[in-house]
Image: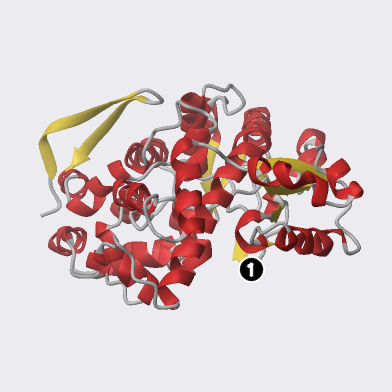
Amino acid sequence: MRSALTEEKVFKDPVHHSVFVRDQVIWRLINTPEFQRLRRIRQLGTSYLTFHGAEHSRFSHSLGVYDITRRIISQFERNDYRDWPKEERLVGLCAALLHDVGHGPFSHSLEQIFATDHEAWTCEIILGDTAVNRVLREEDGQLPQRVASVIRKTYEKPIVVSLVTSQMDADRMDYLLRDSYFTGVHYGAFDLDRILRVLRPYQGTIVVKESGMHAVEAYLMSRYQMYWQVYFHPVTRSSEIVLRTIFLRARTLHESGYRFDFLLPPLRQLFDKTLTVGGYLELDEAMVQTAFGQWVHERDPILSDLCRRFLHRNLFKYIIAEDTSGSWIDDLREEWQRIGLDPAYYLALDTPTDLPYDIYKPETNQGGLDKPPILVLDDRDRLTEISAKSEIIRSIAGVQRGKFYVYYPDDLVRPHADKLASETRERLYI
């Protein structure tokens, strides 16, 4: 096929104003059931319970990542940069569009409990018996494998991978701007146009022209602020903890032989670890929240209570745990059991550093993931890692606040305050 649309398609977008589609294969991918499903998956999971405007979807985010990638590639081609392999344009665009197609409902919480991986599901969808796979194969028989290898970060040309997955990729640039817009904060604002103008393909990777370093500083600072002010927000963490305990309780009940009054087949398959691509694609947030609404009426009091809390936003209270050494947490678990609360579901020690988000780190290998640092190209064609040139970035690179939070249901604990140790009451502000 390899054809352009007879008429360019335009999506109006609150972040990028207009998203342009000129390739027939991109237009056909957007209209597949697998991609349309992303309209029913929120981009920010439970953050809408903290920032009421955060109802935006992975559909709109994926379009944004595609558009930023298209703009980067267009700039490379317009300037005829020799280090950009022009034959890789379509692979890069398809990978950018489809990079999140494997996300499930409340993706990261679901992944933690059921040991699933949205990138693995993305590749299953791209390579499996799906409309996405058929569209890619009809364009080029090798295109599904090539796009999947970009998602896996094993593609033979790392420069294509870095468009979608790196420390300054189209994915991060879109979600910072988009999440900032929809949460109503200004931390995520940076000069996208300026950054796109100073990106260069160089020796198999993408680097930044030195004259644009200050725009990158602003981008990394906005990334730092968004992580601590939005993504790591303790109220959002509380909602995620309640969500995870719902999944944990439901799975535990299922494994014990409990007979649910309401359990849809895809959820049963999820619990049984027999989930197929077809079943996974049926899972969306509407289905999960429907289940929660029904589980409010389940006979199990813990599952019923947790679902009611999530749906009605009656979340856990939190305190900062200044000192987690010693036996205090273990003692707290024993006290919970004494007042009749199961600490597996009603007590959580949490630190935000386990989230899938990260702040900038100069190291090439971060936790086993190959995320090369941002390199600056000077006018003598020398490359330098950006924190070596920027005191601002050096000051925030790899910063970990290391705070721990204790989460618990204050409404269930407070009536039993007289049964708690005085030290516990003091720490919980009861």
Colour logic: secondary structure
Q: Is residue 404 above or below residue 333?
A: above
Q: Is residue 301 left or right of residue 187?
A: left
Q: Residue at x 55, y 52 (%)?
A: 166
Look at the image and tell me in which quarter the N terminus lies: bottom left
190 and 228: which is toward the camera: 228
Tell me if residue 281 can be seen. Answer: yes
In percent of width and height, residue 253 lies at 45, 70
Q: Is residue 23 above or below residue 177?
A: below
Q: Residue at x 16, y 59 (%)?
A: 131
Q: Is residue 363 above or below residue 59?
A: below
Q: Is residue 159 left or right of residue 389?
A: left
Q: Residue at x 65, y 56 (%)?
A: 354
Q: Please, what is the three-letter code of the amino acid marked with disc 1?
A: Gly
In percent of width and height, residue 347 lies at 68, 55
- Where on the picture, by quarter, is residue 22? top left
Q: Is residue 17 left or right of residue 181?
A: left
In percent of width and height, residue 328 lies at 86, 59
In percent of width and height, residue 198 lies at 55, 33
Q: Exactly how many numbered labels are in the figure?
A: 1
Q: Residue at x 34, y 71 (%)?
A: 259
Tell me if residue 159 can be seen. Answer: no
Which residue lies under the disc numbered 1?
368
